Amino acid sequence: MQVFILKNYEEMSREAALEVKDRLLKKPNLVMGLATGSTPLGLYKELIRLHKDEGLSFKHVVTFNLDEYLGIAQDHEQSYFRFMRENLFKHLDINIKNVHVPNGMAKPCDIDEYCDWYESRIKKFGGIDLQVLGIGRDGHIGFNEPGSSLGSRTRVKTLTEETIQDNSRFFKDQSEVPTYSITMGVGTVMEAKEIILLANGKSKANVISITIEGGVTAQVTASVLQLHRRVNVFLDEEAASLLKRKQYYNFVAKATRKFEKMARAK
Ligand code: F6R
């Protein structure tokens, strides 16, 4: 895991966008895993800016979203499909046929088959090259709540009360927040070739310190990222505030940038 601590949310988002840009320039048909929620909004805004101002093209990009509420149709105000369309896809030159968000209206009786299809679709495109993740206060990635198997695949998950409460800010009433979701599994996420984890704000400080400096446990599903070969964590100062080895991460980040510069010069 490489940890980058940025001054604020805007810098965190810009840094993460630069990484996406770099990977996209190297592979125009990049397969991206995407997250919804408040955290990646700054990254998406910056990607839109890079597309508009610098001509960064998403024409051949294929995307797979992590999750969707079960029982919510694509055009529902709070559907993750709609979130992605409004906050990213409609502003880019992406081919909507290459966009995948789990179908919240999949029938309960067909769900296992549908989840297998989602997994096979990821495989068909050669797997996810770059996965973008946010993190819940309870350490979830996607909707893989505490106790989710670290080897899990795309399936139905019941949301915890904490997540329902957190996400109720987007609904008129807490009772409207769905109880179930379809989510990629922890095992699915771990197969991505590279992962970007983003977190900002004080409310994420505790879970970030456990995820990065605690033990690997299914009780904090994000902690399994410690076992992945290529994870870059982008944090603002508030989210990083409880990390014990902050100084070391900053030292490594500086040294890495220097090394990359040297490599580019050769
Ligand atoms: C959503 C997702 C979730 C969020 C997490 C944090 O697609 O994957 O795991 O990343 O709930 O949400 P925010 O960013 O709103 O704090």
Image (cartoon, helix red, strand yellow):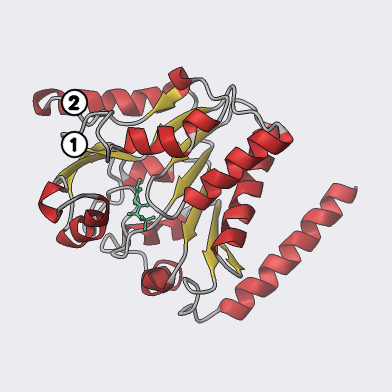
For the point 55% across and 51% down, the residue is 230
Q: Is residue 163 left or right of residue 84?
A: left
Q: Which SS class for mark 1? A: loop
Identify residue type, mark 1: Leu
Decide: few, some or many residues near mark 2? Use Cα within 10 Å; few <14, some 14-19, many ≥20: some
For the point 48% across and 46% down, the residue is 132
- Residue 254: image location, x then y, percent: 73, 68
Are the residues at dot 2 and dot 1 in contact (C-beta closer than 8 Å)? yes
Decide: few, some or many residues near mark 1? Use Cα within 10 Å; few <14, some 14-19, many ≥20: many
- Residue 28: image location, x then y, percent: 64, 27
Residue 92 seen from this side:
yes
Q: Check disc 2 and report the residue beneath it.
A: 106
Q: Is residue 158 left or right of residue 130?
A: left
Marker count (numbered): 2
Height in image: 19 above or below 73?
below
Q: Is mark 1 within 8 Å of ligand 1?
A: no
Sequence-first disc among 2 and 1:
1
Nearer to the camera, 225 or 9: 9
Height in image: 109 above or below 206?
above
Height in image: 59 above or below 249?
above
Q: Of the numbered discs in the image, which one, if any, rests on residue 70?
A: 1
Q: Which SS class for mark 2? A: loop
